[in-house]
Amino acid sequence: MNHNPQKGVFIMRKKEPVTLTDVAAAASVSQSTVSRVLSRYPRVNGNTRKRVLDTIAKLGYDTSAIQRKQAARNSKATLNIEFLLCPRAEQKDMLSLSYFSTVFDSARNYFGRTDNVNLNLCTWDKTRVERPWARLAAADGALVIGTPDRDLLRNLADHHIRCVLIACGSEEFPLDVVGTDNISAGAAAARYLLDNGFTRIGFVDFPDSEEWRLRKLGALAETAERCGAEHFQCRVSASTAPAPLAATFREWMAEGNFPEALILPYSKAMLSLELVLHENGLSCPADVSVISFDDGVNDSFHTEPARFELFPDRIGAKAAQRLLQLIHGSAETPHRIDVPFDFIPGKSVRTQK
């Protein structure tokens, strides 16, 4: 209220409403941070969130418009969710593989029971300049599976894309992950072989695979503790395809130090191993025992593999559930959810009498 000395009257000025810009300046944060706090976005530091909320209360900022917008977003008829496939070079059709197709079907079924969701498939191709950023930015959320590179993970985190990584990712980036406790799984595989009297453990690895890197760490740690790290051997296959795997086994066999027990990346790798063993007059489990991670067992195996069941159906459903929590604002800080695995003895390990 100002006094006008010429007319001797007071003029009441209308108070200007507090803006989002005012809140950001008073809280010493960016406007986008204020927006994320008001949208209940999970990836905001707890202290920062409190400072923004305290500033909003102190300044009397009207949040009703943003709340109405968020409510409309949460209640709109259809959610658009991207199912982002990140294949290896040799994986021409990821959904032809049992693990990935089971995860996809399970996530789709979960969405169908809970929300009206358009689940769209898209592919992150590392060899192409064109990448589906526009689709990811426009989507309500994304599920990411396969082998995402650091560029993708960094951009998902930096652009605050609501997403859940499925059995992949890196601790370097604050993103939600649903998958398997790979260190424990690797340790359990080595432990089973060591408990059955084997002291030379072999491990087949792949480049750029975070889940296999962790399984290797678990298996190595268990072996080193029980009988020394020198009893653990590792070979890296150029790819997961049958021919490169068989070539890896042949080279290993030719060196003359082939292990007495192997940890394989997936059950179907048994086909490549059995071929090479047959070429050398050997068999499983008489000469080489094997434990693997399940991707489906079929009649092509000569020996049913001992394996860890990873339950991709449960992983897919849990990932879908977590993503809906992120979209609806009922999830806070990013975290990892590990679905318990189970062991199926099979017939590929020569057990102690």
Image (cartoon, rainbow, N blue to C red):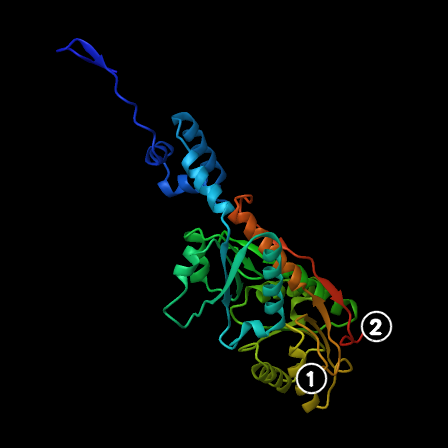
Left or right position of 30 against 102: left
Q: Residues within 10 Å of mark 1 (few under 14, many from 20)?
A: many
Which residue type carries mark 2?
Gln
Distance of label 2 from label 1 (alpha carbons): 22 Å
Q: Quadrant of residue 131?
A: bottom left
Left or right position of 172 against 60: right
Is the residue under label 1 in contact with that under label 2 (CB below 8 Å)? no
Residue, disc 1: 274
Q: Residue furthest left?
A: 6
Q: If the image is split into quadrants, where does the C terminus sit?
A: bottom right
Secondary element at image label 1: helix
Q: Residues within 10 Å of mark 2 (few under 14, many from 20)?
A: few
Left or right position of 70 against 194: left
Q: If the image is split into quadrants, where does the N terminus sit?
A: top left
Q: In x, y percent, where is residue 125?
A: 44, 70
Camera-side residue of 283 and 154: 154
Disc number placed over residue 93 in the picture, else none? none
Residue located 62% across and 69% down the image: 99
Residue located 73% across and 75% down the image: 305
Secondary element at image label 2: loop
Residue located 73% across and 81% down the image: 299
Residue, disc 2: 352
Q: Quadrant of residue 302?
A: bottom right
Q: Residue furthest right?
A: 353
92 relative to 112, above or below: below
Instruction: Point out the tag, 2 or 1, that comes first from the N-terminus.
Output: 1
Left or right position of 49 against 322: left
- Mark 2 or 1, which is nearer the eye? 1
Camera-side residue of 157 and 239: 157
